[in-house]
Amino acid sequence: MGKALAEIKEEQLHDFPFSNLKFDKIGKERGHYTVTEYKKSMSNPEGAKMQLLFYMWQLKTSLKLKEINGKIVSGRTTHLFVKGTPENMQKIEEFMEELSQFLEQPTPPPFVENKFCKGCGYRDYCY
């Protein structure tokens, strides 16, 4: 769905595969790079923001970019614009460190169901 939306909007941008990631769109606007992610719905805005921050961090650190921003589009609306500030880059680095520590645990924590579990594609792995 995201790819189909990406082909309809912002024709000046182009698909950009990088490493093992494939961004919906990336382009250069007014002297800086902008990553655009298309979402079918905005049911988890914080998750979408973290995904976008990870993409931005990956590009900024790997390609040594000076400035990068991102936006999340759903339907015809830009729901979130994220600047590649040092604070945002620090936030994603802290999250990745937390995730790394989580993955190093010898056993997973007990399952706790939340509102996202109902439609999650990974639900069966948690039980």
Image (cartoon, grey):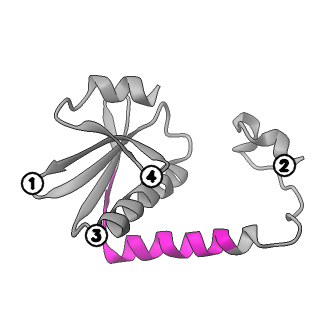
x, y (%) of residue 37? Answer: 39, 42
Q: Which mark is residue 6?
A: none
Q: Which residue is mark 3?
A: 64
The amino acid type found where label 1 is placed reads Arg
Is 71 one of the magenta-colored residues?
Answer: no
Instruction: Give the spatial CA distance, label 4 vs label 1.
Output: 25 Å
Q: Which residue is mark 2?
A: 126
Indicate which disc, 3 or 4, sits on the residue closer to the N terminus: 4
Instruction: Give the spatial CA distance, label 2 vs label 1.
Output: 44 Å
Q: Which residue is mark 4?
A: 19
Indicate which disc, 2 or 4, sits on the residue closer to the N terminus: 4
SS state under label 3: loop
| Residues packed near mark 3 inside 10 Å, few (<14), some (14 to 19) or many (20 plus) | few
Q: Which residues are magenta?
A: 81-100
Name the residue: 36% across, 26% down.
Answer: 5
Q: Nearer the viewer, residue 52 or 17?
A: 17
Which tag is nearer the camera, tag 4 or tag 1?
Answer: 4
Residue 73 lies in what quarter of the image? top left
Indicate which disc, 2 or 1, sits on the residue closer to the N terminus: 1
Name the residue: 46% across, 60% down.
Answer: 54
| Residues packed near mark 2 inside 10 Å, few (<14), some (14 to 19) or many (20 plus) | few
Q: Which residue is mark 1?
A: 30
x, y (%) of residue 22? Answer: 43, 42
The amino acid type found where label 3 is placed reads Lys
Indicate which disc, 4 or 1, sits on the residue closer to the N terminus: 4
Instruction: Give the spatial CA distance, label 3 vs label 2.
Output: 37 Å
Instruction: Give the spatial CA distance, label 3 vs label 4.
Output: 15 Å
- Dominant secondary structure (helix, strand or loop) of the stretch shown in magenta: helix
Is 84 one of the magenta-colored residues?
Answer: yes
